[in-house]
Image (spheres, rainbow, N blue to C red):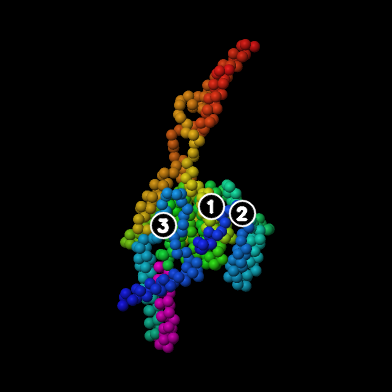
Amino acid sequence: MTIPSDDQSLPTFDPTSIERPDESLVRYYGLVSLLSGPFFPFAFIPLYLKYMTLRYKFDDSGVSMSWGILFRREIHLTYRRIQDIHLTRNIVQRWMGLATVAIQTASGSSGPEMSIEGVLRADELRDYLYRQMRGARGESEPTMTGSIQVIPSDDPLTLLREIRDLLQEKCSSDGRAS
Amino acid sequence: MSVRVEQASKWIYAGVWGILSRWFRVPEHPPALPSSSGTSVESFKPAIGFLKYLKFQFWVGLFAIDLTIFVVELIILVNAPTMGLLLLVPALFFAIVPDVIIYLAIHLRYDTTWYVLSDRSLRIRRSIWIIHETTITFENVQNVSVHQGPLQRWYGIANVSIETAGGGGQQSHGEGNPWQTSHCGLIEGVADAHRIRELIMSRLKQSRSAGLGDEELTPARSGWTSEQIATLREIRDLIATS
């Protein structure tokens, strides 16, 4: 949990500036790998390589992340397709100020499609994603630009038919004139 | 006497909370949910019946386990008195210590579970060690179901599970481990489950595009904007006058 007084001194949160995970993520990975005891190198090396190659890109319509050296993985998803957002912090992550933001779309897997790790201001990232989600802003209703007055003659099909008839008339009269 | 016990347990509980919030960074306040201005955000805990329900399960489990320990200890004590005396201390330990921890954990679980409802979305926080927060907008909700067992009915509580699209294996129906269930938000142990269900369903009905199915039939509207129609009208008039 962030301390409120810290929040005020921080600049406004801009997710588009996030490209790399924070350095504390590698310390977290180190601690997690220590749990495997003698197998520490086997646990830590893949996580370290993931940390080194992890890239995030937040743009106006969606988010993408990529990692891996031998087997590269890239995930792209659009904000509108997000179904649910899970913010998970275990106790080590809370101590280090980290969190996992897991994003789910409507796919068949039970696991999250994307887990964003190593973002320090995860609460704000979550709220940013939330605001981009479908149904969060009340713009889900298709807004018609300028409500159309329903006049029978304004029906596009009638208008197009009239144009066709007029053109036909004109063409035939032009043909007769020449 | 009982007043003193109550006071002492309050102090102990406050002390545990202090440790949790200071050292283990357990947030004390309900999670915030951004909402459009002028709309209310409702945050609540499970009903008090949920605490009683958990405690009832706890007492049943405690009775079963402690009875087993007592019977085994008695048999050993009768057949091999020295062995039985040696095992008396660990037996008492296993009969008492886990119960105290579990009793405390039930209270902590109750106090760290929060449900927040706004007019567009809901947020659920639960658990202590791994704090899990789920956010779902009502626009994405597919179905809402209410579950109630006989014991839960006795305590006047029910579980509301709010499901979104997508597979979740066997755990997708509000059973299984609720905090690992994906594509599902579980509002556990609330007294007014039907009010919550009606609240969510009414918000689902308000929005025409909620869920993944076909959008509801609306009065036939052309996909043309007024500008396009105005241009068409201009073309017609131009041809007609030329």
Residue B17, quarter of the rendered image:
bottom left
The spot of residue A146 in percent (x, y) is 49, 34
Is residue B174 among the parts visible in the rendering? no
Query: Main SS of the magenta segment?
Result: helix
> The disc labelled 3 sits on which kind of residue?
Ser
The spot of residue A47 in percent (x, y) is 63, 63
In the depicted view, which residue is nearer to us: A64 or A154? A154
Determine which of the numbered discs, if any, sits on residue B43 in the image. Answer: 3
- Spatial distance from mark 1 to mark 3, Cα to Cα? 21 Å
As for residue B86 lying within the magenta part, the answer is yes
Q: Could you tell me which secondary element the residue under label 2 belongs to?
A: helix
The spot of residue B23 in percent (x, y) is 50, 70
Vertical placement of B8 versus A86: above or below? Answer: below
Q: What range is drawn magenta here?
A: B79-107
Q: Residue at x 61, y 14 (%)?
A: A174
Is residue B132 among the parts visible in the rendering? yes
Which residue matches tag 2? A17
B84 vs A171, left or right, is left
In the depicted view, which residue is nearer to us: A111 or A32? A32
Name the chain letter of the residue that bears numbered label 2. A
Residue B28, quarter of the rendered image:
bottom left
Q: Residue at x 47, y 64 (%)?
A: B27
